[in-house]
Image (cartoon, rainbow, N blue to C red):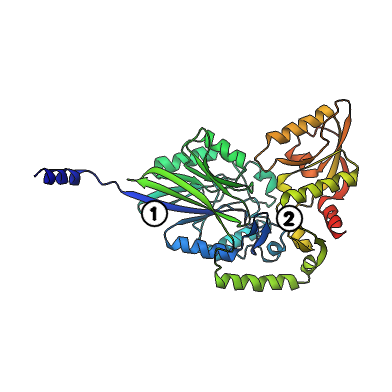
């Protein structure tokens, strides 16, 4: 009798309806269709990513693209094929953030690319683009938005784009998603620098998850200190895919966990996509406009990590302009170099920005401000690799070599000095060194 009574009591209790929603995210693909060499070995390849993400999509996952799918000027694939891959994601990607490079080939080309896809391009503070999207998975409502970072007005060269204040736009869209769309979780899918993502989490309560983008950083899943917001960032070029599982009980978020999935040889390829990529790559290498990029220009005697390449580059910069100090942002170095013959296309992948060397002569105190500023940027893409003396003599003036980007943009506030243009390109110096 007692047993029957307990069973009746348990039956009267409300059921705990637990639901797990899987979210997947990649960002900053930059037209890297082929697998490539990294410090960690073989990574990337759109055929691998398509196969993996399509399988997860069939199992009910939501899939998001953080933006920057193309990149004018490098690699050659982007200049020849532009947004050809965008429709390959139809039926797989649920929404894409607008990235600063996605309009590199003009507003007209962007609109043509947009018409070829079935998923929305989202950017909450970009006039004319969709502000947010809401997805329902097993009764759970997931609200998604994206932000054009504060640097978009200077980075996006195409006409026809206007950007509003990122923080104000985020605050407004979170309120709309929570109060009017009645979502159970709010997710941001891009596209701003990591320090701005962290600041946004502090400034705008109610964001449950931010997928990192724009800074090209690899960041494991973690909560942003002092907030209720989780963060994860998948590096670049489809080297990794972010995977997050959100658990809900009666539509209330009760748990979040995540990890990075390496896109490597362990992931099988989509055979149709792989065949298409190989055919397109052969056509690219035979194209008279691009084939010189695939000719051997030098030889790499041993594998070079990103740090190895940065060390070589800074040494060449100091030597070329007789400088005491050389520095360049971490973001200037986008890849490692494997041992063997080197092509210009491989070098452009590792050093995608054809920056000019500029020189400033500054007193020791000014140099220390530059070094302190770099230290304050640790963990961001504007942190610097630096080649400098072991100690600084307070009575000495220093000749400092850097790039035009660092002197005039990233470190402008501490490069308050007369800037001597040298006419020497950083990438060309490295090419000459490796050719020797």
Crowdedness of circle 1 by 10 Å Cα count: few (<14), some, many (20+)?
Answer: some
Left or right: 136, with 258 as reference point: left
Left or right: 405, with 139 as reference point: right
Q: Nearer the viewer, residue 140 or 341?
A: 341
Dividing the image into 4 quarters, which one contains the N terminus? top left
Tag shown at residue 172: none
Percent of width and height locating residue 136:
39, 53
| Residue denoted by label 1 | 137
Indicate which disc, 2 or 1, sits on the residue closer to the N terminus.
1
| Residue denoted by label 2 | 350
Q: Write down the quadrant of residue 31 in the picture.
A: bottom right
- Looking at the rendered structure, the secondary structure element under dot 1 is strand
Dividing the image into 4 quarters, which one contains the C terminus? bottom right
Q: Nearer the viewer, residue 210 or 191?
A: 210
- Whether label 2 touches label 1, CB < 8 Å: no
Percent of width and height locating residue 25:
53, 53
Examine the rendered structure and indicate whether residue 89 appears above or below residue 194.
below
Examine the rendered structure and indicate whether residue 9 appears above or below residue 40.
above
């Amino acid at each position: 009798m007692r047993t029957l009574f307990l069973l009746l009591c348990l039956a009267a209790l409300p059921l705990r309806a637990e639901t797990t929603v899987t979210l997947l995210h990649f960002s900053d693909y930059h037209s890297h269709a082929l697998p490539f060499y990294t410090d960690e070995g073989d990574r990337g390849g759109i055929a691998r990513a398509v196969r993996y993400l399509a399988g997860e999509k069939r199992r009910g996952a939501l899939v998001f693209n953080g933006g920057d799918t193309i990149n004018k000027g490098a690699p050659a694939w982007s200049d020849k094929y532009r947004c050809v891959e965008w429709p390959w994601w139809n039926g797989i990607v649920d929404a894409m953030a607008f990235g600063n490079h996605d309009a590199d080939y003009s507003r007209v080309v962007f609109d043509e690319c947009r018409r070829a896809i079935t998923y929305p391009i989202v950017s909450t503070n970009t006039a004319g683009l969709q502000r947010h999207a809401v997805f329902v998975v097993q009764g759970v409502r997931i609200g998604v938005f994206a932000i054009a970072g504060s640097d978009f007005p200077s980075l996006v060269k195409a006409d026809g784009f206007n950007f509003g204040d990122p923080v104000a736009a985020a605050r407004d869209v979170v309120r709309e998603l929570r109060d009017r769309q009645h979502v159970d979780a709010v997710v941001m899918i891009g596209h701003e620098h990591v320090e701005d993502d962290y600041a946004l989490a502090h400034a705008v309560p109610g964001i449950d998850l931010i997928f990192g983008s724009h800074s090209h950083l690899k960041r494991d899943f973690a909560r942003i200190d002092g907030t209720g917001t989780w963060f994860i960032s998948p590096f670049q070029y489809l080297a990794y895919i972010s995977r997050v599982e959100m658990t809900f009980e009666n539509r209330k978020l009760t748990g979040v966990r995540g990890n990075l999935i390496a896109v490597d040889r362990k992931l099988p390829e989509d055979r149709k996509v792989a065949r298409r990529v190989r055919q397109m790559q052969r056509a690219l290498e035979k194209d008279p406009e691009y084939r010189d990029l695939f000719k051997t220009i030098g030889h790499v005697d041993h594998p070079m990590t990103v740090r190895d390449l940065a060390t070589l580059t800074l040494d060449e910069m100091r030597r070329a302009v007789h400088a005491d100090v050389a520095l360049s942002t971490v973001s200037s170095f986008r890849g490692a170099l494997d041992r063997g013959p080197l092509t210009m296309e491989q070098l452009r992948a590792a050093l995608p920005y054809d920056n000019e060397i500029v020189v400033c002569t500054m007193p020791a105190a000014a140099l220390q401000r530059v070094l302190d500023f770099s230290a304050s940027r640790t963990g961001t893409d504007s942190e610097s690799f630096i080649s400098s003396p072991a100690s600084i003599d307070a009575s000495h003036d220093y000749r400092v070599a850097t790039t035009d980007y660092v002197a005039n943009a990233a470190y402008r506030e501490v490069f308050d000095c007369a800037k001597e243009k040298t006419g020497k390109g950083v990438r060309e110096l490295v090419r000459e060194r490796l050719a020797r």
